[in-house]
Amino acid sequence: GHSPKSLVFDMEAEGGDGPYATFESELLKVETTSEPGGCEVAKTLTFGDAQQLELGLIMAPDEIEPLFSGAAWAGTTLWPAATLLCDFILNGFDHGRMKPGARVLELGAGLGAPGFVAAALGADVVITEQQELVRLLAQNAARNFAGEAAQQVSVRALDWSAAAASEITEAFGGWDVVLASDVVYEPLYGDSWQALADCLQALLLPSPSLVAYISAERRTKDGIDKFLSRLGDLGMEYAVEREEGESLL
């Protein structure tokens, strides 16, 4: 297997003022494209044999306003935990599960970077988010996957619940891997971690061999420990696969 690689996050990178404007490891490089005024317009991920994914950040005016009535705005930024999950996948820490043809579901995808990386490696991926963010995800899917490759990526709206998890599983025929990053943070998302736990349980029921990889940035009163406890109460086993510094796992 691979040993953990060093990761470098730059919070003050020239050309971008968002969280961690650049990132570089041995297998992944993330760069930010900004307009002259400093507004970020895209993230570019480079990996493998010079493969690239370009994730646009620009939304139409009628799409932006609804974001600020809740927490959906957080899905328009590439957060460190998502970048870490991409690097985790590229390093093969998933024990070979992300192979060509693997059936992958990403929950609370935001910009969808981990799911898109999985698709670039040959997996069949369904990327899900709140309805407000589906159009941006679909645009980025079309931008990066054309022709036959477009069949590898589906974008769907999904609210977390056991019923919704069962419906999407029935529609797509089951999963080998579930991905999620920075989906638990009580100050922003409240106790939605309870619905997430119920959703994960419903996904696992028909697929006992299913594995979920969830990355998170630890923050004050983030609710992650309560979420993990809830997973245990529902009969799910979990383990910390990898830690980076004091805040990312």
Image (cartoon, rainbow, N blue to C red):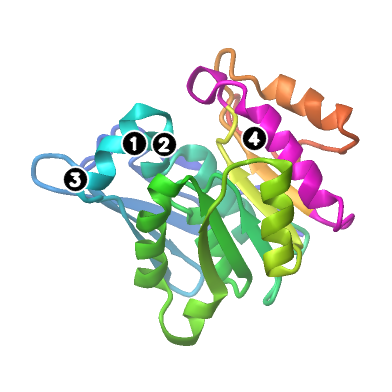
Looking at the picture, does residue 124 appear above or below residue 213?
below
Q: Earlier in the sequence, mark 1 or mark 3?
A: 3
Mark 4 or 1: the one toward you: 1
In the rendered image, which residue does mark 4 sit on?
249
Q: Is residue 90 left or right of residue 52?
A: right
Q: Earlier in the sequence, mark 3 or mark 2?
A: 3
In the rendered image, which residue does mark 2 sit on?
72
Q: Where, quadrant-wise, is the N terminus in this rendering? A: bottom right
Residue in front for this viewpoint, 16 or 153: 153
Per the image, label 2 sits on a secondary structure element best described as helix
- Residue farthest left in this picture: 36
Query: Is residue 199 part of the magenta span, yes or no?
Result: yes
Q: Amino acid at mark 4?
A: Leu
Residue in front for this viewpoint, 111 or 206: 206
At horizontal 63% and vertical 41% (from top left) the residue drawn is 160
Q: CA distance from mark 4 to mark 2?
A: 23 Å
Residue contact at pointers 1 and 2, CB within 8 angstroms: yes
Q: CA distance from mark 3 to mark 4?
A: 35 Å
Mark 4: few, some, or many residues within 10 Å (few <14, many ≥20)? some
Percent coordinates x, y for residue 247 in the rendering = 58, 26
Q: Amino acid at mark 2?
A: Ala
Per the image, label 4 sits on a secondary structure element best described as loop
Residue contact at pointers 4 and 2, CB within 8 angstroms: no
Percent coordinates x, y for residue 146 in the rendering = 41, 80
Q: Quadrant of residue 93?
A: bottom right
In the rendered image, which residue does mark 1 sit on?
67
Mark 3: few, some, or many residues within 10 Å (few <14, many ≥20)? few
Q: Amino acid at mark 3?
A: Pro
In the rendered image, which residue does mark 3 sit on?
61
